[in-house]
Amino acid sequence: MDPLLPGDPTRVGPYRLIARLGEGGMGLVYLGRDEDGRTVAVKVVQADYAGHQEFRRRFAREVAAARRVGGSWTAAVLDADPEAGVPWVATQYIPGPDLHTVVAKDFGPLPEHSVRVLASRLAHALRAVHEAGLIHRDLKPSNVLVTVDGPRVIDFGIARAMDSLSANSLLTRTGMLIGSPGFMSPEQVRGLELTPASDVFCLGAVLVHATTGRLLFGAAETGLNAHLFRVAEEEPDLTGVPESLLDLVRACLHKDPARRPTPSQVVERTAPEPAGEWLPSAVLAQLGRHAAQLLDFAPVPRAEPPADAPAARPDPRVALARAETQGPPQPRAPEEPGTPAPPPSPPAYTPTTPASGPPSSSGPHPRRWWGLAALVLAQLTVLLQAGMGLWPAVGFSLRMSYYGPVSVLAVHGFFFGALLLSGGHLADLVGRRRTLVIGLAGVASASLLGALAANPAMMIAARALQGAFAALVTPAALALVSTTFTEPKERRKAFGIYASAAVGGVAFMMLPIGVMLQMRTVGWRPGMLAAAPLALIALVGARTALHDGPRRTGSRFDVPGALLAFVGVGALTFGLGQGREFDWAAPVTAVLLGGVAVLGVFLWWQARRSDSLLPSYIVRDRGRVGCYLAVILSGVSPLGLFGALTFHLLYVQDDDQISAGIGFFFLFVGLLLGATQVSARLLDRVGPRILITAGLVTAAAGLALLTVIAAAGLAFVGYTWAGMLVPGFGLGVALMPVYSIATDAVVPQDSGAASAALATSQHLGGALGATLVPASGTLWPVAGGFLLAALLAVPLLSARTRTTRTGPMTPA
């Protein structure tokens, strides 16, 4: 570390700068601390580049891309402001030397077990980068920092979205060479289009350096052109690579990119990792000294230049001319004879837009399971206040009566669905816990307004507000589950419980609701207030038992995106809701087609923005698209499946709401068993395809069985109750993987958007299911939807899942 110079800023955003760390290609890197004492690395763009509009667009694009990268073995983006006068980005500071310093200067080649761990964890990091749609493009020893618990990949400054830059970009016009000569792939040298396999070649070169201490194709003293020719045409020298790693390294260094292993295959070939410490004791001792120096580090007075020296400003292009073999800059000599040199310090940390994700050192929240109970209660609140829309219909005798475009019964679903994506976006901007608390308080207040309603207009307003605030609760609650439970085993269990409540909770509550409807013992005013106590209890639980992860910074609310989402989803919700009543008349069809068109414009708009409401990488992932399609086709929501089952149970049991409620209770029991006792235990063993397919087929068979029982005249209580266990069990088996995959491989800053996308798909699927099911009570259309989901959606999913140390399950 070097002291700040007179021309350096003292603060950037919320961070106080205390030292210089080094220079990057387009700016300077400072050591900073926030008000809580957290140490960060702050990259500040040079003013010359900041004034270039094309560079600004590229910088904003790369910051948005960096937020998408997760995983244990990458550095985390903590904060950024691409719109500032001088753009900057703050990342997690890694207090350790780079691999080049460890191997080439201080300790020499690493032992075999250390290199095996290095290979495995760098492959984990590359997999996270590639799953975000990026290529690192400059993986080399100086971009791998060595820490006590493992390596960290940094410097995503020239990683980019695969479709983000054109041939006429700023990058091309400035003549910058992408990559470092000693660690470039053959296709990189030839100027060909790069794929993720290029990073795998660089990984092989890094492993050779770690095991032998030399460059893959020798030193570059013979000239750059000769060295690049050897990279492109000659076979690498693997002398000194351990026999157990030789085949893996040779495969990574294959000239044909298609013949190289994927990062996931590298992980498999290096498993299991050796037990014990991953580094030699001498290296660990030095890392301990570095950590102690960082803890004791205090800002020193600025270094004042001599009075007769002209003001100097570092040239950012100097770093671009450094060859890899030169290593990091050496410490400066003492200013006066006899003055002791400063102790060794960590190397310059110069990321432009490093990877995102929560710091891996953060442990699980001690009250997280109490927090899950609060989240389950919050979701039950949403379901209960949605179901209590029956009471105002009875109290005001407004069934099928319309006031404006929607009825009292439909207004809640309209505003809930239309505002889900905006609710997820707001959760990412202001915080998921804060959004959840606001939503729960709003639901309770709207319930009170409905209980006090003196006319239909007040009731419609109350139901609209309930739906709007519920659209904040649902994505915020699911996002908190995703970000709170990151250890794989806990994550599967938590999603099994939450999915059961999110979809089956309404079934659990159908028995008391059926009793009240049958006995007519409760008026509509107490019914409107029923959700308020649950909302307040969940609010207290969220405040005391939950903590939130990082949120988006430097981003503005996407107003155009929110409007497009509201119109598009709202049109589909309204059109599907009117399809049954108006028998798919031409106006309804026009509304549906218009909604689809608006959603297409919405997705186009999202792909153009760096701070979009729904980041495009979320909806471009095949696994997530498969999950969305599965819930849409199967109508997996309280409004879809349970609407159909309500028709069925009331039809075959002569409007006996108490018996119907008991049947729904059996459905919930089956769902809970399937999600927590089957899927949560078998997901890692058999993969999502098998589980989701088996679950959907089982649910379809159960629905068909119920219909056959009714048609055969056997629909008395015992058969119906027992029959409800089967579709519930199948639904539970399918739901847990769907919820997990749909929120997987998403950085915490976008977890609200990912959760809202799943909730919106579920809402539209439910509206579609409720519309298509005939009032006769037959369940054949719903069963067919489950089979269609298994046929069309499941093939989009990966065959298996992998679990990483950070917890989220990532498709292989």
Image (cartoon, rainbow, N blue to C red):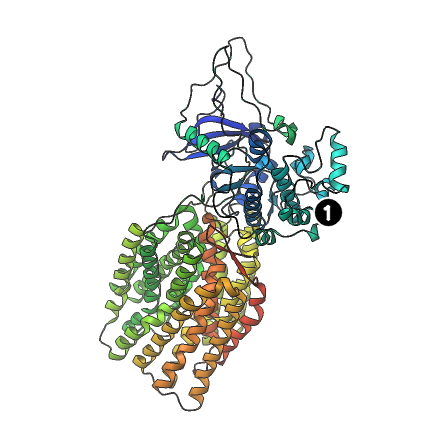
| Of 262 and 766, the residue lying toward us | 262
Vertical relation: 443 (above or below) 81: below
Please state which of residues 26 and 679 is positioned toward the viewer in this rendering: 679
In this picture, is 305 found above or below 476?
A: above
Q: Position of residue 261 (x, y in %)?
A: 65, 52
Percent coordinates x, y for residue 786 in the rendering: 51, 73
Residue 401 sits in quarter: bottom left
Residue 673 visible somewhere in the drawing: yes
The residue under label 1 is which amino acid type? Lys
Residue corresponding to mark 1: 255
Position of residue 50 measured from the top left corner of the image (x, y, whole percent)? 56, 32
Nearest the eye: 204 or 596: 204
Q: Is residue 128 above or below residue 533?
A: above
SS class, disc 1:
loop
Q: Is residue 715 left or right of residue 151?
A: left
> In the drawing, does residue 542 fall left or right of residue 278?
left
Residue at image position (62%, 52%) is 262
Residue at position x 50%, y 44% from top? 356
The C terminus lies in which quarter of the figure? bottom right
User: Which residue is outermost to the top?
Assistant: 308
* Residue 571 visible to the viewer: no
Count of numbered circles in the view: 1
Name the foreground residue: 791 vs 225: 225
Residue 75, percent from left and from top: 50, 41
In this view, the residue farthest toward the left is 521
Crowding at label 1, few (<14), some or many (≥20) Cα neighbours within 10 Å?
Answer: many
